[in-house]
Image (spheres, rainbow, N blue to C red):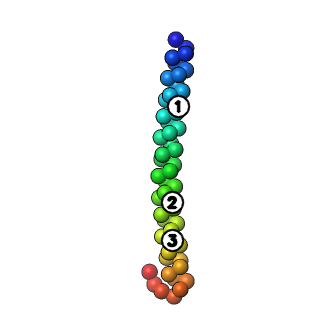
Amino acid sequence: MSFSFISTFAVLFNLVLFGLGVYALILFIKLAKLGIQALDIYLYEKRGERF
């Protein structure tokens, strides 16, 4: 009885961690895109061009 409870809990815990990892990866990709856009704008302004 307790063995199945522990293994079920472990599987659910791993699924939650996997979901959080995917969510964190998506947020990181969005942040990287914004950082690249900000860098592009900065470089255009630094060269005297307007974005």
Marks 2 and 3, how far apart at CA: 11 Å
Q: Is residue 2 above or below residue 17?
A: above
Residue 43 x %, y %: 53, 79
In the image, is residue 32 above or below residue 21? below
Label 3 CA crowd tier, 10 Å (few <14, some 14–19, many 20+) = few
SS type, badge 1:
helix
Element assignment for label 3: helix
Total number of numbered labels? Answer: 3
Q: Amino acid at mark 3?
A: Ala
Label 3 sits on residue:
38
Q: Residue furthest left?
A: 51
Q: CA distance from mark 2 to mark 1?
A: 27 Å
**How far is disc 3 from disc 1 in space, using C-alphas?**
37 Å
Of the image marks 2 and 3, the number of the one nearer the N terminus: 2
At 50% from the left and 39% from the top, the residue drawn is: 18
The numbered dot on residue 13 is 1
Q: Amino acid at mark 1?
A: Phe
Residue at (52% x, 31% y) in the render: 13
